[in-house]
Image (cartoon, coloured by chain):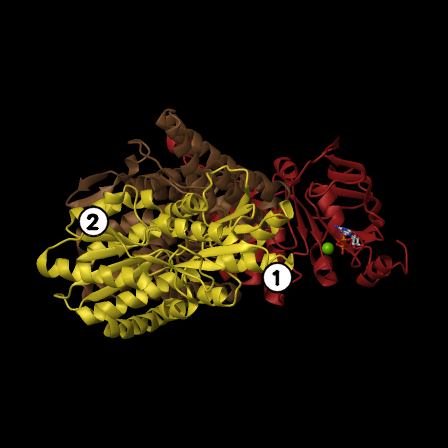
Amino acid sequence: MNTATASPPETSPSLKARIIGAPSAGPLLVLIGFCVIFALTNPRFLATHNLSIILQQTVIIGVLAIGQTLVILTAGIDLAVGAICVLGTIVAGKLVNLGYDPVLSMGFAVLVCTAAGLAAGGLVSGLRLPPFIVTLGILGILTAALRLISEGGAFAVRDPFLSWTGNTMKLGGFVLTYGVLIMFTLYAVVWYFLNQTKWGRHVYAIGNNPEAARLVGIPVRRHLLSVYLVAGLIYGIAAWLALGRIPNADPNAMQTANLDSITAVVIGGTSLFGGRGGLIGTLIGALIVGVLRNGLTLAGIDPLWQDLVTGILVIIAVALDQMSRRRN
Amino acid sequence: MSFHRIRTSARSKALQAGISALGLMLGVAFGAGSASAQEVIVGLVTKTEVNPFFAKMRQAAEARAKEKGVKLIARAGKFDGDNEGQVAAIEDLISAGAKGILVTPNNSSGMLDIIKKAREAGVLVIALDTATDPADAVDATFATDNFEAGVQQGTYARKAMGDTKAVVAMLDGTPGGTVDTFRHDGYLKGFGIAEGDPSIAGAAITNGAQDKGQVGMENLLSKNGDINAVYTINEPAAAGAYAALKSFGKESDVMLTSIDGGCAGVRDVKDGKIAATVMQFPYKMASMGIDAVAEYAATGKKPSGFVNTGSFLITDKPVEGLESKDTAWGLENCWGD
Amino acid sequence: MSFETNTETPPHVVLEARNVVKTYGHVTALAGVDFELRAGEILAVVGDNGAGKSTLIKALTGALHPTSGEILLDGAPVHFRGPLDARHAGIETVYQDLAMAPALDIASNLFLGRELRAPGILGSIFRRLDKKRMREEARRAMSELKFRLPSIDNAVEALSGGQRQGVAVARAALFARKLVIMDEPTAALGVRETGQVLELIRSIRERGLAVVLISHNMPNVFDIADRIHIMRLGRRAAVVTPKTHSMNDVVAIMTGAATA
Ligand SMILES: Nc1ncnc2c1ncn2[C@@H]1O[C@H](COP(=O)(O)OP(=O)(O)O)[C@@H](O)[C@H]1O
Ligand SMILES: [Mg+2]
């Protein structure tokens, strides 16, 4: 037996290898590349207030994409992200406009969103229905429900607490909204759970090989349920952030949020087949979309190019994922 | 992070190739589009890219911008109700240093904060087509008086029907929209009835789309076969309604009217499918908007208040005491071809 | 190590099945099978395709519920509600498809479902994983089994078939307290890799664990097994030893051409 003696040659990978090897290295290169191009074209691009604006524009899709990442990591997909988030804005806005306490109203709205996530998770894990169909169904139901609750129209939501996340603070010459800080905090917290805890490990395992997860004793169904629940909670928080950005509840809003969040996740290098990728990539993916849109406008170029370039990036990302999956 | 480490080198090579390709494409785009620093920049933010009304507006703005020697940057929401998209567009345009922004606000109350910010930054903001609520949130509004246009539609329908007892169907656009409300209320006023009048058989939501207009009309006809007057939010909805009426064999008994002045709509009037439509003038709104920004850049003078860009009743069956133009005139002045 | 059928003190039986039946609708996968695994032995389970080997193993490990029959662990009846129960009872299984998450690294796969938490409040309140300790333990387990791997940080999908099989066997060895069950662990492997895995199986026996080995490969079975349990049509046709019977005898029993 030729393996009997030598102890395994263990080399801890160097820092350089770690950085290049990280799955988000590719998307990061793309982001930096675009930033350099735009900075060269129009110096205004790098103005602190412009960078701050890009961050603010990334908040809603960026946060929705956190939940989307979790769902996609389990090999699912969530088409109801936008609808659940809009539900949150309308519930909170309605209650506050009826005179209820804003903190309780927002809290209740977040609960409602969490419940919507739980419902999706229950159908996916309990009845074993495909996530695509379940969330498509929920999207339809909510779209109708939202029209009914809001009596068809959009309405203004003027409350200091509900729009608090849109307030700004200065951070060393950089003006940030609380919404931006909340977004980064959420990324940090969820990243921690995804990468440093058993819960996150099991999210990857379930997406990667659900049968293996079951055989090693992971309660797959309960775990899936928890993922959709957390996603719903995150969409609820996104609703608060959305009210901070636009103090307005509109049943017609966020119709493309599902596809936009999926785009951020995919460009960020997370596999649509589940089990591969991560949150850092998603944040970068969301920023790429925001930087493209803003940068093209500053360069005076038709922003239709943004859709075109984003489309190309999505295809590249999916192709790379396919290639690497096929190789193994 | 220990996942994925294996395949990274091939992966990042492929990515680098992808990036260079994209860079090249962008380079081409920049070559075509780059703006000099001194140029006066005018932003145009429409509701969507696809609607021919906004397409016409954009074309007219582009043409006028060229004449005036200003640079136009056009942006649009992705769908009706894309408040976030419009807000982001205005933010970007402020960053880009736009002198003035022409906006067709999707949802009037959703845009107020960013419009305020733009004006505070010294940007002239003009609402096109749709007023904000309150209207003085912007410097000026260049738009069709939609209530007046609704009144024109309603008055024509009532007069053209003579003494016939009316049973009315309302094919609305997207409930809650300002334009929607004005046209709807205007029609009722012109028709001489109030909201909730027993002669109103029912309403349907069409989102201004032909397919939904058809479905809505079918459903209303199933509910009440005596319908003989139909209000429509725009001509695509009217075209859908006509298809439904035809399938019920009622196309000649019903007073179908509309608003917009799109070329397809005017042709429908000419063909007798729609009795009359009220034309509005997107190119006027856009070119007046460009003129106003150019003037503001040169002299610092700002327009103010509501500027009605006008609306004309188009029909080949005019009625007594109501001014109208025929479809020949309509086809010369319509938009969307 | 060898077991004579006529020793005076009867050997300790670790795992036993009595008259286990499993039907799927009209299909009878197990038709009243008996099974006996003795302490410290390598018991091979052989049989034609569809004879019921995998189904038997699943019944023994709680991966499915038998229609009827009895399963005893150390002489006491047990009712496993799932694979987790069997694992808690000290039974580890290497499934035919290995039950690995290929995109995760080796250490993560070794500890999948049994992750170690960091000590102190980091672990108890912040639920933080002890990645360092898991990697160290993984490394220790692999070297104890004398199994050589490029790096413990590699994703499992980057390993060769033999290396993956090695990781799966190591996982079972690391956690088993009583016995390890392996379903066709060498089916997809080349000669050299097969040798490595057989070596691993022997080192598990050396640690005092009993091993159930399902295999089609007669030379392997005769090379390594202490006894051979022969399945035929959902029943145990015979139990023989490599000493008393030849490969041809075993094949004849498997196919019904002979009886023991
Ligand atoms: N889930 C199942 N549903 C129906 N029949 C099954 C199922 N699993 C196994 N069988 C049947 O039970 C019999 C025994 O199968 P199996 O235990 O896989 O045999 P082996 O592993 O010895 O090849 C076969 O006839 C097989 O078709
Ligand atoms: Mg089998």
x 14%, y 57%: residue:
B296
Is the residue B88 above or below the residue C220 in the image?
above
What residue is shown at x 67% (from left), y 61% (from top)? C187
Rendering colour (chain A): brown
Q: Nearer the viewer, residue B101 or B197?
A: B197
Q: In the figure, what tint was chain C given?
A: red
Residue A54 in the figure: left or right of residue C100: left
Chain under disc 1:
C
Quadrant of the rendered structure where residue B66 is?
A: bottom left
Q: Mark 1 highlights which residue?
A: C195
What amino acid is labelled 1 in the image? Gly
In the image, residue A254 above or below residue A110: below
* Residue C97: image location, x then y, percent: 63, 55
Q: Position of residue B179 (x, y in %)?
A: 38, 49
- The answer as to whether callout 2 falls within 8 Å of ligand 1 is no
The answer to which of C131 and B75 lies nearer the viewer is: B75
Which structural element holds mark 1? helix
- Residue A4 visible in image: no
Residue with the most extreme left position: B299
- Indicate the position of residue C89 as horizontal and vertical percent values: 64, 35
**Pointer 2 residue:** B139
